[in-house]
Image (tube, rainbow, N blue to C red):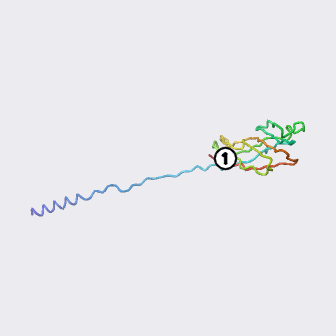
Amino acid sequence: MKNSIKLLAALSIIGFSGTAFAQNSTTAAATASATIIQPISISVGPTALEFGNIVATANGGSVTESANNTDYSLDAGSDPGAGNYGTGGHDASFTITGANSANVSYSAGPITGLPGTVSLSIPGATGSGNLGVGGSLTVTYGGTLTIGAGVGAGALSASWTETAMYN
């Protein structure tokens, strides 16, 4: 009987001393969220960049249409006496719309369509801003048209693509 009590005691100790396992996995709940905002858009106008009537001279030169319709300044590329000062020149504008108070950037692509002796720079057509509470930003800009020596009479036209994006 002594032996059977010892055996019973040994078996009960073995039964209670099973292998202890550490935690080998866990889980956590995750969530995903998004806010759908208005797509950004850009429109040109109501005016395009216009330099008016220019009388080219043999030396060439440039005409600058400044932003905010403050008219343009002339140099050797035009002749104020020919009646071109202030005729037809006006700045350009475009409007960006999108999410209220969003930060945006805008940029002008390459300028095309001008002959090799004529160039156009439009520094105001690249920059950044905020759409404000109303979700809109209007940008007004001018430019400088440089006319090479010996450019003949005729209409000039240039084009570029204006791009806007959320920052």
Query: Which quadrant of the view contains residue 125?
Result: top right
- Residue 36 lies, in percent from the top left, at 60, 50
- Residue 13 lies, in percent from the top left, at 19, 58
Q: How many marks?
A: 1
Q: Is residue 53 visible?
A: no
Q: Residue at x 79, y 35 (%)?
A: 70
- Residue 51 lies, in percent from the top left, at 82, 42
Q: Quadrant of the N terminus?
A: bottom left
Q: Nearer the viewer, residue 61 or 122?
A: 61
Q: Is residue 101 visible?
A: yes
Q: Residue furthest right?
A: 82
Q: Which residue is mark 1?
A: 98
Q: Is residue 32 above or below residue 101?
A: below
Q: Is residue 4 above or below residue 154?
A: below
Crowding at label 1, few (<14), some or many (≥20) Cα neighbours within 10 Å? many
- Residue 114 lies, in percent from the top left, at 79, 50
Q: Residue at x 77, y 43 (%)?
A: 92
Could you say whether the residue bearing mark 1 is in a helix, strand or loop?
loop
Q: Amino acid at mark 1?
A: Gly
Q: Is residue 151 above or below residue 5?
A: above
Query: Which quadrant of the view contains residue 85?
Result: top right
